[in-house]
Amino acid sequence: MTPPRTSYPKQDIRVLLLEGISQTAVDAFQAAGYSQIELHDKSLPEAALKRAVAGAHLVGIRSRTQLSAEVLAEARRLIAVGCFCIGTNQVDLEAAELAGIPVFNAPYSNTRSVAELVIAEAILLMRGIPRRNAECHRGGWSKSAAGSHEVRGKTLGIVGYGHIGTQVGVLAESLGMQVLFHDIEAKLSLGNAHAAAGLHDLLAHSDVVSLHVPETTATQGMFGAAEIAAMKPGAHLLNASRGSVVDIDALAAALREGRLGGAAVDVFPVEPKGKDEAFESPLRGLDNVILTPHVGGSTLEAQDNIGLEVAAKLIRYSDNGSTLSAVNFPEVALPGHEGSRRILHIHRNVPGVLSQANDLFREHGINIDGQYLRTDSNVGYVVIDVTASERQAEDLKSALAAIPGTLRTRVLY
Ligand SMILES: NC(=O)C1=CN([C@@H]2O[C@H](COP(=O)(O)OP(=O)(O)OC[C@H]3O[C@@H](n4cnc5c(N)ncnc54)[C@H](O)[C@@H]3O)[C@@H](O)[C@H]2O)C=CC1
Ligand SMILES: O=C(O)CCC(=O)C(=O)O
């Protein structure tokens, strides 16, 4: 006997996972009954991406895949997007929302990995190790203490005192560093960290400056020639946030001229799509610079946790309709719906849609068991649990889809 349908038919749901997302995500989807999983170990060029997303219901990406409005327009079956990382700047979040597509991410799972790398780099730079390492590779032997310092007692300036910035601060204090931070929001200082009077105050007092801001219109280009010039002579700059935050040519010039002691850079304005593409940067070839290929969050621990976290969010939305922790969508936390059909209606947030929806239930003679609504300035998301046959639920879905302003409707059984 065929078991009763308990959710949208999972055998029909196609999951597309790009950029080498962890096996833990694949295992989680399979354990939840999703069998159509297409895996790619890198991001796809735009034309191939458009073809791939056209058939997908759930798409998982990391930081390299650009889900622009044009790409999303091709994704007509798309139910939800999972960013298996923190940053969501690679997705046109508003276009996704207006297409009725919630976007999820993993706001915490790789933060410790970034913080550990940053601390290691701060120590290596303060000791002048990148240059000494490069010299040894060339057969040199500059055994000298010149330009080599302990981090103990030195000042670390953290720009963006969020999940990563605060962890960097705590670890730095455990090494005996003084911590200054600058954030656009008022932030609780952890340990003995102090809020600087402003960005330039922080720059004037820090031996090492580490950037931990998200990419926003305000942070794009926020660290340019003026900010670099405001740093202490010989100080070090670390950027593991986003490549667009720093003027890379200005940074390269300051490093070449010796105005800065060194830098560690993990993120770049243009990053290769995969290992087949060459990495180009004005920082290449500079001995006082640690270059890493956007691996701040790339530890096995972080990736395994991210795989579990984001897959769970996508599965929960697909099975249950919950949008809790979506970054671009009204958040609705939903109980189970055993014994009820669940109808999801995503619409533009304009007056009258909800009353028309409720009228439909009355006209169809269907009693509402539960109703959950959240809105933001763009979109309304209403979830309606009903006692109805599968046929009645499908009829309601079609009637709801005809309400002007409707973006998406789905039925969960
Ligand atoms: N290199 C890598 O592999 C990774 C990079 N990242 C990047 O690190 C960024 C930060 O991550 P989290 O700390 O988790 O984010 P978060 O959101 O917890 O913290 C960011 C902080 O920056 C502050 N901020 C925003 N605009 C600012 C401005 N103009 N000036 C000063 N402060 C500003 C915010 O108020 C917030 O406190 C992510 O958005 C992502 O781009 C994250 C993980 C891995
Ligand atoms: O590991 C990745 O793909 C991206 C990491 C990152 O930059 C993020 O989490 O925002």
Image: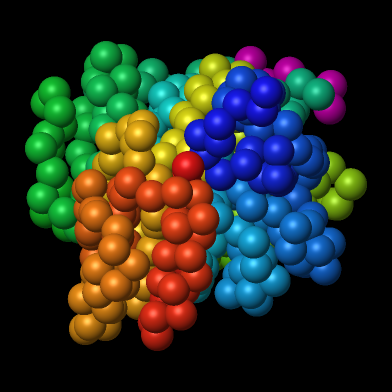
Can the viewer see residue 217 in this picture? no
Q: Is residue 31 above or below residue 186?
A: above
Q: Quadrant of residue 33?
A: top right
Q: Residue at x 22, y 48 (%)?
A: 370
Q: Residue at x 61, y 35 (%)?
A: 295
Quarter of the figure with the N terminus: top right
Q: Position of residue 13 (x, y in %)?
A: 67, 45
Q: Is 352 inside the magenta-drawn segment?
A: no
Left or right of 106? Residue 17 is right
Q: Position of residue 277 (x, y in %)?
A: 86, 52
Left or right of 137? Residue 2 is left
Say which of 248 and 39 sits in front.
Answer: 39
Q: Is residue 67 above or below residue 114?
A: below
Q: Which residues are magenta?
A: 138-143
Q: Position of residue 406 (x, y in %)?
A: 42, 76
Q: Is residue 37 above or below residue 382?
A: above
Q: Quadrant of residue 142?
A: top right
Q: Position of residue 93 (x, y in %)?
A: 46, 65
Chief secondary structure of the magenta portion: loop
Say which of 29 and 267 sits in front.
Answer: 29
